[in-house]
Amino acid sequence: MNMYLIVLLMLIAALLFAAINVMREYERAVVFFLGKFQTVKGPGLILIIPVIQQMVKVDLRTVVFDVPTQDVISRDNVSVKVNAVIYFRVIDPEKAIIQVENYFEATSQLAQTTLRSILGQHELDEMLASREQLNIGIQKILDEQTDSWGIKVTNVELKHVDLDESMIRAMAKQAEAERERRAKVIHAKGEFEASEQLVAAARVLGESPQAIQLRYMQTLTEISGEGNSTIVFPLPVDLISSFLKKD
């Protein structure tokens, strides 16, 4: 009789031990009663009746998922390899367990297909220069589609956009040609502005003979300061005509 009592006490102790569960601050327990959803418990100490009740533990912390490299063809038919990282977390444990079989795998696959779909709608220059806008666009789409799973996608970051060697060389040639074009445009603008200034200066000198004489004198002064031993400089008759008239 004592043996049966000892076995019974041991069985009760084992059931109590199995019933006691402790959920951490970032954990929740989705509890099912005979297979039917009952409630979400935690954090702290919770009791689960063995056999009658079952629980599924859910982690509420942010998950950092590195999206594998995806082959993407841009809108301008350039093949690139793109990888990204997404940050998401469970905000509704009930939906995360009931509405989808494996919320992590589902979010992972959705992130990969969405990345290829969205980037394929943009040209290569947009991928390289407008990453912030692309990150926000992908994040919004993922967040909307995972809302029914109780998942919140908080951030998406494109990490690398890798090009083929031939495309890198072509882009380098394009950039060099663009720099040359800009240099020629700047040089042409400089020549145009200089010609305008020369025309304006000629107009002023033509209206004032005294200004021409002063310019000649200034030129003589500049040349004489260069240390030349002999200077041959044409002297206009107009410059000394005033002196000849006085004589």
Image (cartoon, rainbow, N blue to C red):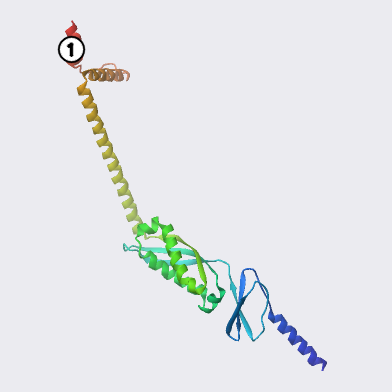
Q: Which residue is outermost to the front?
A: 38
Tell me the residue that label 1 is attached to: 241
Q: Which residue is outermost to the top?
A: 247
Name the residue: 42% across, 69% down: 114
Q: What's the amino acid at mark 1? A: Ser
User: Does residue 111 appear to the left or right of 222 in the view shown?
Assistant: right
Instruction: Point out residue 82 in the picture as x, y percentages from the top left corner.
Output: 42, 63
Reply above or below: 6 against 106: below
Quarter residue 193 falls in: top left
Reply above or below: 72 against 200: below
Q: Nearer the viewer, residue 85 or 167?
A: 85
Instruction: Point out residue 81 in the picture as x, y percentages from the top left corner.
Output: 40, 64
Q: Nearer the viewer, residue 193 or 90?
A: 90
Q: Secondary structure at mark 1?
A: helix
User: Does residue 99 appear to the left or right of 209 in the view shown?
Assistant: right
Instruction: Point out residue 113 in the picture as x, y percentages from the top left corner.
Output: 42, 70
Name the residue: 35% across, 59% down: 124
